[in-house]
Amino acid sequence: MSSFRMNRREFIGAIGAAAFAAVANTRAAESPSLAPSGMQKRAIPSSGEQLPVIGMGTSGTFDVGATEAERAPLVEVLRLLFDGGGSLIDTAPSYGRAETVIGDLLQQGDWRQRAFLATKISAGGGAGARTQWNGSLARLRSDKVDLLQVHNLVDWRENLAFLRELKQAGQVRYVGVTHYLDHAHDELARIVQAERIDFVQVNYSAATRSAEKWLLPLCKEHGVAVLVNRAFLDGRLFDTVHGREVPAWAAEIDCRSWAQLFLKFVLANPAVTAVIPATSKARHMLDNLGAGVVADAKYQDRIAALVS
């Protein structure tokens, strides 16, 4: 959206066009990154493993073809993610060609060992789920993934049993369930209470706070990691603040853009493990990484008031 791009451009102007160009034009994997340092990590409760708080989604953004022109910007996005201290990449077989592109680029950059790779099962249980899983492995060019999730609660009981089977076999390190709409929060909460899972992925933003009421506290209580999708509400949060300056008090929490404010709102909740905004642009990834030093929870209501 045009408002989204303008806000991001303002941020890039603030850090200096020359500095950004040095990063965006870099092609050598060993080159230094100008992405922010000091990325905070949070523990995955079921294991204690530390996960960087800024990850990356791939819905829409990595559904591209095989040409160099289409993929070169995504190479820079991945380079910035890794060099900026991130590792989490979330994808799904239903995201068009995203799994294929991720698999190809991770191999091309020799980055697989640096990635915390998450994908999903959205087929019905049984043979359909097994076929989809085998296809994901082939597209991702990997014999295992770090996190496998039941996508949008599709046939979740049978599929969760399948995920646990894969975990027992060593093909999956963690299992979880996902959804992206408020109406699913009650069902997600019931699963957290009744099942042993490692992750929940859920929608949460400064303008959509339903998860705060019950689901996020339950996840914290039961030791379930939380990944947050739709932190920008599919870009609509940027429309809400279009034409407005970032408030002066944002400097108190080291925010220089609206994106950083919105991400820090999410990460200020102690139940959240990581947030996964999708992007296909290096300048947006650089911006997102700037939110990796997390704000104090006392700023949440102030940020939410900006989009109310």
Image: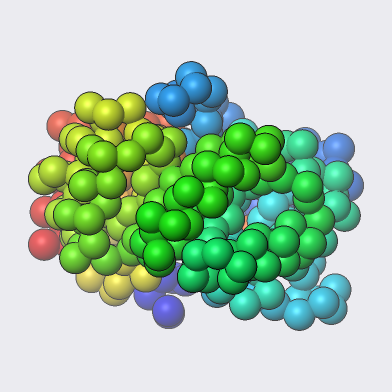
Left or right: where does residue 72 sit relative to residue 44? right
x and y, in percent, of residue 258 in the image = 34, 55
Q: Is 215 or 191 nearer to us in this picture?
A: 191
Query: Residue at image x 38%, y 75%?
Result: 3
Q: Residue furthest top?
A: 48
Q: Is 163 or 225 nearer to us in this picture?
A: 163
Q: Residue 144 is drawn in which quadrant?
A: top right
x and y, in percent, of residue 12 in the image = 53, 56
Could one spot residue 62 in this view of the protein? no
Query: Residue at image x 83%, y 39%?
Result: 31
Tell me the quadrant of the picture where the N terminus can be found: bottom left
Left or right: where does residue 234 sit relative to residue 67? left
Q: Is 287 or 132 nearer to us in this picture?
A: 132
Left or right: where does residue 139 sit relative to residue 282? right
Tell me the quadrant of the picture where the C terminus can be found: bottom left
Q: Residue furthest front?
A: 126
Give above or below for 188 relative to 214: below
Q: Is 41 or 169 nearer to us in this picture?
A: 169
